[in-house]
């Protein structure tokens, strides 16, 4: 299972302008193979973990955060300076999905499922890792 890293977890973007803290353990985590995640990340899938917005704190660079808001999808926040994706969802909402790649060190959780396999990239086989699989969005 997952490790139990010390809280708060630290995270941020690639250029270092945006910094944040995660102040409680992540609630769940998943890989998403949707087309939006492929475009957004430039690769086959994206790993994100859910946290209550109240347990997420921006420490620096709030003015640099931009958001892609696709029709019918959650806003996808990224750093305007370096393009690093940070989280999905509005900080005004109950919960957000933090990009695991934005966390420094062990996030203390492992992805538990793979969603949107119906749009998975043809060039990357889905690993036989025992994770739950969903053709569309997982609950
Ligand atoms: Zn940046
Ligand atoms: Zn996705």
Image (tube, helix red, strand yellow):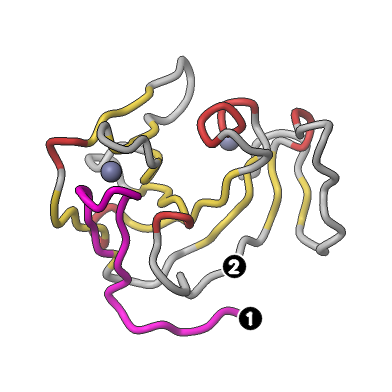
What residue is at 40 percent from the left and 40 percent from the top? 88
Number of callouts in the render? 2
Report helix, strand or loop for mark 2: loop
Report helix, strand or loop for mark 1: loop
- Crowding near the residue tagged with mark 2, few <14, some 14–19, many ≥20 C-alpha atoms within 10 Å: some
Q: Height in image: 55 above or below 106?
A: above
Quarter where residue 132 is shown:
bottom right
In the image, is 46 to the left or to the right of 69? right
Q: Which mark is residue 83?
A: none
In the image, is 98 to the left or to the right of 118? left
Query: What predominant SS class does the magenta segment belong to?
Result: loop
Given contact means CB atoms under 8 Å apart, are the residues at marks 1 and 2 in contact? Answer: yes
Which residue position is annotated with label 2?
Answer: 110
| Residue at mark 1 to residue at mark 2: CA–CA distance | 8 Å
Indicate the position of residue 73 as horizontal and vertical percent values.
47, 25
Indicate the position of residue 128 as horizontal and vertical percent values.
87, 59
Quadrant of the rendering where the C terminus is positioned: top right
- Crowding near the residue tagged with mark 1, few <14, some 14–19, many ≥20 C-alpha atoms within 10 Å: few
Ligand 2 within 8 Å of disc 1? The answer is no
Quadrant of the rendering where the N terminus is positioned: bottom right
Ligand 1 shows up in which quadrant of the image? top left
Quarter where residue 44 is shown:
top right
Q: Which comes before the other along the chain, label 1 or label 2?
A: 1
Which residue position is annotated with label 1?
Answer: 1
What residue span does the magenta drawing correspond to?
A: 1-21
Indicate the position of residue 87 as horizontal and vertical percent values.
38, 44
Quarter where residue 103 is shown:
bottom left
What residue is at 69 percent from the left and 42 percent from the top? 115
């Amino acid at each position: 299972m997952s490790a139990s890293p010390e809280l708060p977890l630290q995270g941020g973007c690639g250029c270092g302008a945006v910094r944040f803290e995660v102040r409680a353990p992540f609630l769940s985590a998943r890989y998403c193979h949707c087309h939006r995640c492929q475009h957004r990340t430039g690769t086959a899938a994206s790993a994100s973990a859910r946290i209550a917005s109240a347990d997420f704190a921006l420490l620096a660079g709030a003015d640099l955060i931009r958001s892609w808001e696709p029709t019918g999808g959650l806003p996808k926040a990224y750093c305007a300076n370096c393009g690093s994706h940070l989280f999905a969802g509005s900080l005004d909402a109950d919960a957000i999905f933090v990009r695991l790649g934005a966390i420094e060190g062990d996030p203390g959780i492992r992805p538990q499922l793979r969603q949107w396999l119906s749009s998975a990239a043809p060039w990357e086989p889905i690993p036989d890792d025992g994770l739950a699989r969903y053709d569309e969005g997982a609950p």
